[in-house]
Structures are given as structure tokens and as C-alpha cells.
Image (cartoon, coloured by chain):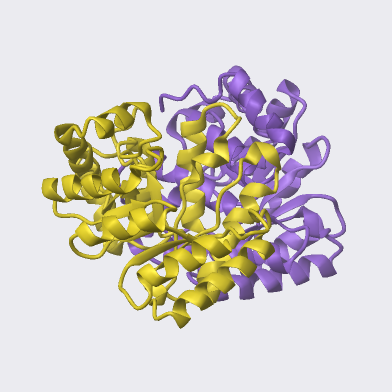
Chain colours: A yellow, B purple
Amino acid sequence: MEIVGELINASRKKIRDDIREKNREVIASVAKEQHEHGASFIDVNAGIFVGKEADYLTWLVSTVQDALDAPCCIDSPDPKAVEAAMKVHKGTPMLNSISLEKDRYEAMLPLIRGTDVKIIALCMSDEGMPYTKKDRLKIADNLINGLIKNNIKMENIYVDPLVHPIGSGNHLGKEFLDSIRSLHEQYEGIHTICGLSNISYGIPKRKFANQLFMAMAITCGLNAAILNPLDKRMMANIIAAETLIGKDDYCMNYVQAYRDGLFDLNQ
Amino acid sequence: MEIVGELINASRKKIRDDIREKNREVIASVAKEQHEHGASFIDVNAGIFVGKEADYLTWLVSTVQDALDAPCCIDSPDPKAVEAAMKVHKGTPMLNSISLEKDRYEAMLPLIRGTDVKIIALCMSDEGMPYTKKDRLKIADNLINGLIKNNIKMENIYVDPLVHPIGSGNHLGKEFLDSIRSLHEQYEGIHTICGLSNISYGIPKRKFANQLFMAMAITCGLNAAILNPLDKRMMANIIAAETLIGKDDYCMNYVQAYRDGLFDLNQ
């Protein structure tokens, strides 16, 4: 499971101020803490700073990479900001994200064509967001074929089918889970990714529901996620679910996690 | 999800003594408590009392059904004990179990032919226990066809694919989960059932692993289970997983469970 740490996002009030004030210490420590807790990519998002996004985003990338040796997930719909951030990024970043929306697709494609960048491909088009497996797979198929044609490797494509709240319709969780399963059945080597907290929007005990839904998504093949790696039960569920689904030789990760106290849960 | 409460089993030291002493109060209260916590069937097992099993089993059925208005799951491989227990049972029981082992199959079939009894069909044959999905489905297909030919309704067949410890092989969890999924894809109306605690045999934090594996099995279609309904997080995971997979209109069970404090978890 590849974890993208989601905490350095300007939409979070506290972090917003730290970014505005370019508080290196805080950003560095939030990056390090996420990395120590299992994040292999550090998401950086400065989307709310209209007109200044490129400046803040490049600062975030440099600050994170000065603090630790890990790639960033450059999180912006603005091709200029993404391009600037990619210029200062050391090694191969992840990009969050491309979609089938015409403007976004055409603006992002030149930045990634023929590169080894890992690209999050949102199942979204100019017709809007899909709600069924069928509609998701239609969009995903166009995205995947387009990216492959532009010399992007299958294993560098991270498809995000987009989760909708279960409170908006009984079927929405299953449609999402079936989409994950079908993507792995139909595109060998593909990655699937999501930020799944949307599933619990509008119902109580959101953390509990999200932690459980993660294990259900892993059962269907999910192999990357954007989340808060400091959520101890979420990380415990990921480790255990991957063991139970057969991705942990001799249960070594499970036993190591147990020895490290990661299963001492009170959350 | 149909829950079979597993606690009245003579293999449990404490219960064994209560059965031997025919302690009505204890058996009645253990039955009631399981029913109040969501068990729709009360498993009764007196298997260790060789030669006296029929006597103890009939006493258990009467004692449980005097205490509450619920069916039992008559749990014995001995056709004589099962026949005696069925005679005193009020309403339609569940039987645990038939298998493809020739002697057991031929001894049990006459007891259930043409009845409305709910029958647990173990994926086991005289060649032993299957470990792959393919071998499980071969046995299940023979069992299901045999039972249908003998006028047992599809919805009264509860196939148990049998869980093996993940510690014995990485693939064993996935083979089991894939078996559950395929059974529901291939036999409309079928029930699948299991006692899944075997999955965690030999690894630490067994309750945690079992609780999570339950949500994973529900993701694949599992719709009945033999378990301890007093395990609060297990029951919470079942309610939440069924909501997330689309079996809870308007999240009403989820919200009710939240209001009833079932999600106030410290386990």
C-alpha cells in the first residue's frame, strides 16, 4: 500500500497560516511525522492562495524535501503552479491530478508526457462526476488509453474512482468498491488510489466508518490512498487487511507492526 | 446478516460443567444474552459427551427454547443426536452440519430431505479439506445440487467454505474470500456462513484480525456467521460493513446502532 500523507494542505486552517507565514519548522515537522508514520509521498497543496499558488507550492516542495528524502505529491489543478513545483522537485514526484475534463487534460498532459511521474487520474469528465461503476470505467478507460499513448507507464497511473457519501445512496459504496475491483481486473499493473473520507459524510462516527471502509477497499484491490498517517487505527487496519488479503509474506509486516505497538489501539 | 450465537458449546470448559450439571439458569441466560445482542439462532453443542450426546442435546434445545422464542442451531455430526434434538425443537431449526463426506452425507440427508430446515453445508469431502477456491467450489457444487435434488430450497442452504489460518499461507485468506464471492455469483439466493476465528490462529491480536476479516468477508457477500455476539466491535463492524456495502436503506441500522451506543467502542 502506497500512502500519500494529506496533512500539508492549505485548506486546513492551521496549516494555511503556517504556509502564509512560510513557517519552515512546522511544515518540515508535519512532513517528517507523516513520513515516519508510513507516508511514502507527502501531499503539498496551496490551492487557496489565488495568484500566489506557484510561489507557495514551490516553497512547500523545497521545504519538505530539505527536511526529508521523500517525493512530494504535487496537488494542484493549475498547470503553471504544477510546472513550477516540478522544476524544484528532486526525484520523481506524484501529481494530483489529471482528469478527463478537456481543459485540465490538455493543460496537464504536456507536463507529464513521456516522464516517469506518477499521475493521479480522477474519474471525472466535462459531463461531471460518475456515480456508477459503468460510468467510472468508461472515463477511466479513456484516461488510461490516453496516458499510455503518451508514453506513461501503466504502473505510474493511479486511478481515483472518487467516493460518494453512503448517506446519499445505499449503492454508492458498492459501486465504488466494484469499480476498484474491475480496474485491477481489466488493467494489469494499474494503481488505484482514493481519499475515502467522503464515504462517511453526513453519518456519525466518521473515523470508525472510514477505517472500516479502507479494509473493504483493500479487499477489492485498492493499493494506494491519500490519508492522515497519524490515524493509528486506519494504519493498523491497512497493515492487517493487506496481511489477510495475501500481501504480507509469512505475516512479517503484521508481526512487526504488533511488536512496534501499532496494534495497541484505543482509537 | 444472520448471526448464530456460538457460546453454548460443550468444548468450552465453563459451559461443559453447566451442561453436565444441567444448570438451566446458566444455559437460559447465555442463550438470552446472545439473542439480545443480535443472535437469530442459538448454537447448541454437546459433542464431547460421548454416548450421552442425544440426551444432553435435547435438554439444551428444550432449555434454550423454554427461555426464549428463537430457533436453535443443532450442532452435531451424529445423526441420532440430531434426530432426537429435532424432535423436541419447536419451529424450524438450523443444522450444523452436512458435508460431502459419504457417511455424514448419507446419514444427514434423510433427516432434512424435503424439509424447511436450514442446513450448514461444509466444504469438506472424503478427500479432506479444500484450500483453493476451485476445490471449494467443486465440493460446494456437489453439495448444493444434491440438496436441491432432495427438495431443499436454495435459500436454506448455508455453505461454509471453511477458513484456514493466514499464518499457514499468504493466499489462504484470499482463496476463502474469493470462494464467498463466487458462491454468491453462481448460486442466486444461497447463504454463505462461517466461523472465521480460525483465520487468526497463530498470529497476535486475534480479535482485532477477526473483526477486520469479518468486514472483508461481508465485502465479498458473506451473509451469515457463527460467532460470539457479545464481541462488541465484531457486531459494530458487521453493522457498519453492511451499511457500507449497500444493505442498509438510508443508513437506518447504522444510525440506530449509533444511538444505541453500539459504536462506543473500547475493544
Residue drawn 73% across the image and 41% down it: B85
Considering only vertical position in the picture, is B193 above or below B188? above
Along the viewing direction, whichever of A234 and B45 lies nearer the viewer: A234
Residue B45 in which image quadrant:
top right
Report the side of B101 relative to B58 (left or right).
left
Residue furthest to the front: A51
Give me the residue at 20% from left, 57% from top.
Answer: A88
Residue B22 position, x and y percent, is 59, 25
In the rendered image, residue A9, in percent from the top left (x then y), is placed at 35, 39
Residue at point 59% right, 61% down?
Answer: A179
Viewer can see residue B7:
no
Q: Is residue B189 left or right of residue A202?
A: right
Query: Which is nearer the eye, A131 or A250?
Result: A131
Q: Quadrant of the C terminus of chain B?
A: top left
User: Vertically, is B125 above or below B240?
Assistant: below
Residue A165 visible in the displayed image: yes
| Residue sitting nearer the eye, B196 or A14 | A14
Q: Is residue B86 above or below residue A136?
A: above
Which quarter of the rendered picture does the N terminus of chain B lie within? Answer: top right
Residue A126: % across, % down:
64, 59
In the image, is residue B60 above or below residue B153? above
**Apparent side of residue B180 relative to residue B70 in the rendered image (left or right):** left
Residue pictured at 55% horizontal, 32% vertical: B236
How many marks can you see? 0
* Residue B14 percent location from the top left of the image: 45, 28
Q: Nearer the viewer, residue A202 or A118?
A: A118
